[in-house]
Amino acid sequence: MDYNQGGFYRFSNYVYWLIIFNLLFVMSNILLFSAFILLIPSISNAIFYYIAFIPSGPACAALFHSLSVLARKNEVAPFKEFVQAYKTNFWDVLKVWIPIITALFILIIDIQYFNQNPTVWYQILSGIFLVLLFVMVIFAFYALVITTHYKFRIRDIYRLSLFYFFTWIKRTTGNIGILFLTVVLMFFTSDFIILFISSLVAWLLILNTKPMIQDVKVSFVKDKNVHDDNSIHN
């Protein structure tokens, strides 16, 4: 028997990789997690949360990219892959990320305002904006995944994210389901559980989105011979 190919060996490797990715993700998001721990969640602190969220874009993109490498190769050097993805795509990700979190924060502030004025109309608007918030989160996920794998103009990244959101319904529904179950788990346990399951949630999202990543290359990238490990210029 080849122990290197055994089921338990492979399983333990995946557990190890996910733990390391989780630690790297938390460390690169220390500003955001510190804000959640130290600040009261209120509109008055919105600007501080907004600033804390800015570095989370490159951190999320690095995590998504590293896990997509793992999904494709079934092995990965976690520290090297994460750090390289973070450094290589940092500025490109920020250009895509900042407009997205600006829109997200506008939605969140509006939802808070509607909830403070419990009229029927405001409750309807609050529900609509909550749906839009979920749409924006999945849109942001697609945008970060595309940005960290390929090089497109920002507006083309947004267009592709919308295209895959509305045309790959099964994948989009699956991703919404993963995020919804994560929120439910946080509701019944603690918000801080996300500190321990970030890489697992991202891993499930990447596994569900893996065909989309490949489809972007097949359908929209001119040079089909360039490997996905690096950013691809279109």
Image (cartoon, helix red, strand yellow):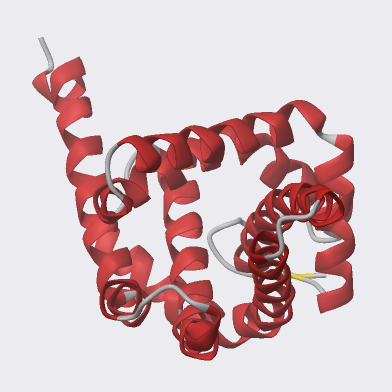
Residue found 25% across the figure and 36% down from its top: 14
- Place residue 188 in its image quadrant: top left
In this rendering, the answer to whether 22 lies above or below 87 is: above
Residue 9 horizontal/vertical position (percent): 14, 26
In this rendering, the answer to whether 115 lies above or below 198 is: below
- Using the rendered image of the protein, determine whether residue 27 is visible from the camera's viewpoint: yes
In this rendering, the answer to whether 94 lies above or below 219 is: below
**Depth order, front residue of 215/122:** 122
Q: Quadrant of the N terminus?
A: top left
Residue found 68% across the figure and 49% down from its top: 134
On the picture, is 20 further left or further right than 131? left
Residue 183 horizontal/vertical position (percent): 47, 42
- Place residue 12 in its image quadrant: top left
**Depth order, front residue of 179/153:** 179
- Place residue 143 in its image quadrant: bottom right
Residue found 40% across the figure and 44% down from its top: 70
In this rendering, the answer to whether 112 lies above or below 218 is: below
Total label count?
0
**Depth order, front residue of 219/91:** 91
Residue lying furthest top: 1
Residue found 28% across the figure and 47% down from its top: 190
- Using the rendered image of the protein, determine whether residue 153 is visible from the camera's viewpoint: no
Residue 119 horizontal/vertical position (percent): 79, 54
Q: Quadrant of the C terminus?
A: bottom right
On the picture, is 125 further left or further right than 118? right
Residue 200 horizontal/vertical position (percent): 35, 41
